Amino acid sequence: MNTKDLMDTAKSLVADDKGLLAMDESNPTCNKRFARMGIPQTMEARRDYRELIVTTPGLGECISGAILFDETIRQQKKDGTPFLKVLTGAGIIPGIKVDTGAKDLAGHPGEKITEGLDGLRDRLEEYFQMGARFAKWRAVIAMGDGIPSGSCIEANAHALARYAALCQEAGLVPIVEPEVLMDGDHTLERCHKITEEVLRTVFNQLHS
């Protein structure tokens, strides 16, 4: 782990009032959107769509980093230029979504745990060699009758911390995203309380 490189990347990602482009939608999600529009659900159609995004004129003037999906980071323009080269040429730092999605948390109806830790060290090493310099992992915390439970919050916070440590080990800046869903009939005060609890638990896990 090169701490200076990690800090330099992190500073670059938040510099000059630029934002991050999340183009990390999974293939199934992309295909569902294509289906609604009558677009073929093929790898080539997804490639064409993503090429439109990465070749947007002036993209680097507003975007500091782009979060990619596994298929996307391996794709090229029609002329054979890798998407990674197009992005870096525009001054955009490539990133990669590495979680494998939120799945039902066993024994906790209505709650989710984000998976993807198995084999993550090797995947991170490969992504770094390909040119990625940061990663993203999203945890989903839902509110409802009796949820979220302490177990759900702890499990997701622990997974986020393990992911973050592995990212730093591999030379990737980790984006840690504990998302407390706002959907539901709960009060604003309860949302504030749960969000505070989730963030405190995540920070404690990251610190330890």
Image (spheres, rainbow, N blue to C red):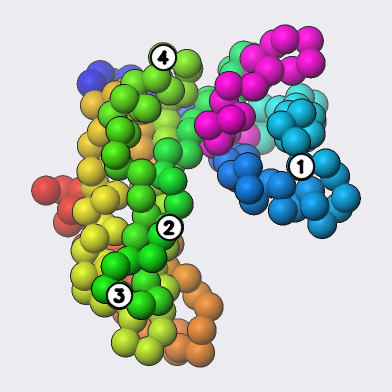
Which secondary structure lies at badge 4? helix
Q: Which mark is residue 129?
A: 4
Amino acid type of the residue that numbered disc 4 sits on in the rendered structure: Gln
Residue hosting label 1: 41
Which secondary structure lies at badge 2? strand
Amino acid type of the residue that numbered disc 3 sits on in the rendered structure: His
Query: Mark 1 or mark 4: which comes first in sequence?
Result: 1
Q: Is residue 64 magenta?
A: yes
In contact (CB < 8 Å): disc 3 and disc 1: no
Q: Residue at x 50, y 75 (%)?
A: 182
Residue hosting label 2: 102
Q: Nearer the viewer, mark 3 or mark 4?
A: 3
Residues at marks 3 and 1, CA–CA distance in whole angstroms: 34 Å
Query: Mark 3 or mark 2: which comes first in sequence?
Result: 2
Residue hosting label 3: 108
Residues at marks 3 and 2, CA–CA distance in whole angstroms: 13 Å
Q: Is residue 94 magenta?
A: no
Left or right for 158, reference 68: left
